[in-house]
Image (cartoon, rainbow, N blue to C red):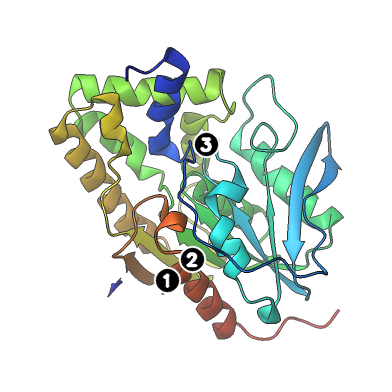
Amino acid sequence: MLVRPALKPADFLKRLSWTLGLATGLGLMTSPPVQAADAGPMRQRVGAHELSWECRGEGQRTVVLVAGMGLDVRATFKNTYRLFPTELGRICLYDRAGVGQSSPLSRARPLQALSDELAALAELRQWGELVLVAHSFGGLIVRSFALDHPQRVRGLVLVDAVHESWLAQLPQVLSPNGWSTMERIIRWEKEQHSHEDFVEAVQSLQARGAPSAALRALPVTVLSRGLPHTQIRQTRMSYADVDAYNASWDLAQARLALDHVAPRRVRMTHASHFFDEQDPWLVVEEIEGLLKRLPPPAPR
């Protein structure tokens, strides 16, 4: 591996959800101005929903940024998006239905629906060949998408992305109180906030069995946090549980890399789970590196 006052109930639940990639509160660094050619936020109807999206740059190959559970993609990737050098191609981001600036949802959707939504948006916007960059829960979505559409995906950059093995570890390594906290987070996301179902998504990917040969052979970079994710301590989770939570995540990151034939593994030594406020440059550099390792886009 490469080394590099009392809360109101609603506020408390938001802080609980930070562990799965929710709640922004990012101290964002200065970023380059948007080029005049960039249109800014746009909307696209996909099925019954209006999705918010935007792009910078041009090209036959598109880098697509995919946020974690319940996260506004512009908060998750704000600096990464603005710092990306568009001479390398097009970079786009979008909010899933129920999240950020896209239309709301009234009930949870399965992982397959999230993969299908991305496929439809990419087709409607003619994004061409895709390099998918996913954070946290977004890793489940892009890996499902790559299984569904192997001919469209040229590479994956997984930024502290969840692996399906992590969920089963938690009740084994956390105390009963710690596991209860995690159950509350998962239930609140599904039933009240983003209507994204972490348990169903994990089970859906597990049900597909071992990764396909096409997925295993994809160029993949796995970036894992080098600093512990400690925001969950704001729920009064014990220090021992916070440590166990982080240790189990590290183990799952190793398993994520093992799902691929020749992954590039990088530890973000100066960043935690919310990497964009701490070291967006490393993520940009790793996206650049993956793009440069790929053959030229196929002519249309």
Q: Indicate whether 289 appears above or below 211.
A: below
Front position in the image: 203 or 121:
121
Give me the residue at 29% from left, 47% from top. 249
Query: In the image, what residue type sits under mark 1?
Result: Val
Q: Which of marks 1 and 2 is nearer the N terminus?
A: 2
Give coordinates of residue 128: x percent, y percent.
78, 68
Quadrant of the snapshot with the C terminus: bottom right
Give me the residue at 73% from left, 43% from top. 117
Give me the residue at 58% from left, 69% from top. 83
**Quadrant of res 231:** top left
**Quadrant of res 179:** top left
Residue pointed to by mark 3: 201
Front position in the image: 82 or 107:
82
| Tags 1 and 2 touching, CB below 8 Å | yes
Residue pointed to by mark 2: 216
Q: Tell us which disc is closer to us: 2 or 3.
A: 3
Give me the residue at 29% from left, 29% from top. 234
